[in-house]
Image (cartoon, grey):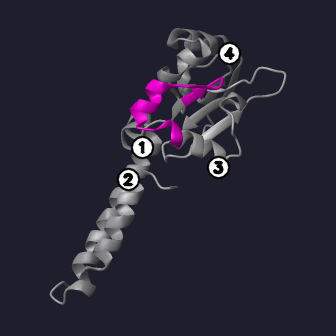
Amino acid sequence: GELQPAELVITILLSDVATMPLQSAQVSLFQPVMLILLLIALELLATHFGLKYRKFRTLTQGNSVMIIKDGTLDQAALKKLRYSVDDVMEALRLKDIFDLNDVAYAYVETNGALSVLKQSEGKQTELPVLVVCDGEIVERELPLCGMTKASVETLLQKKGMTPQDVFLMTCSMQGKPTIIRKEDNA
């Protein structure tokens, strides 16, 4: 449950390749070792590209999906994920939540785990929305905080920055930004 799909496939392939010499006397030890090194190299390369390029990471790992907002299930998101209500309720119970009304927001993460932000008693729960990640504006998240690409760029310009200068920027649903500048050596 903790591995990304690509990592799981590589792990299964590695174990299968490692047992090849044990299964057949005709297979030399050299071939499986070379194949294992190739698989490890491809995994390292994919990890490097995933860290460097957000679109590649999205392609290979996907994105988290909001399935609950203010105690309301997003039925379209559940259908897209092929999640049943029973699956959601079970995941919530495992987090000691028995009432949907106790949930402010819930996301299904890329590894299938459910992340939950509980309602705060007596005050509105604020969900920080990812706006800029490693120098790139995350356009799919902007509607959640009422921003546009242009408004993000304008806000950053007022602070003397461009999106490329930003390592991480989140914004509350009320529009309050939190910005972490990229370090020069990063």
Between residues 119 and 96, which one lies in front from this camera angle? 96
Q: CA distance from mark 2 to mark 3?
A: 26 Å
Q: Is residue 132 visible?
A: yes
Query: Which mark is in front, 2 or 3?
Result: 3
Task: Identify the disc placed on residue 159.
Answer: 4
Q: CA distance from mark 4 to mark 1?
A: 33 Å
Task: Tell me where residue 159 appears, x and y as whole percent.
Answer: 68, 15
Asked if marks 2 and 3 touch (Cβ < 8 Å), the reply is no
Give the position of the C terminus as an image quadrant: top right
The total number of labels drawn is: 4
Q: Which residue is mark 2?
A: 6
**What amino acid is labelled 1 in the image?**
Gln
Q: Which residue is mark 3?
A: 94
Asked if marks 4 and 2 touch (Cβ < 8 Å), the reply is no
Q: CA distance from mark 1 to mark 3?
A: 25 Å
Q: Which residue is mark 1?
A: 61
Between residues 98 and 143, which one lies in front from this camera angle? 98
Q: Residue at x 54, y 15 (%)?
A: 143
Horizontal side of residue 100 vs 43, given as left or right: right
Q: CA distance from mark 4 to mark 2?
A: 39 Å
Task: Tell me where residue 169 appears, x and y as whole percent.
Answer: 63, 26
**Magenta span:** 67-86
**What amino acid is labelled 3 in the image?**
Leu
Q: Is residue 185 visible?
A: no
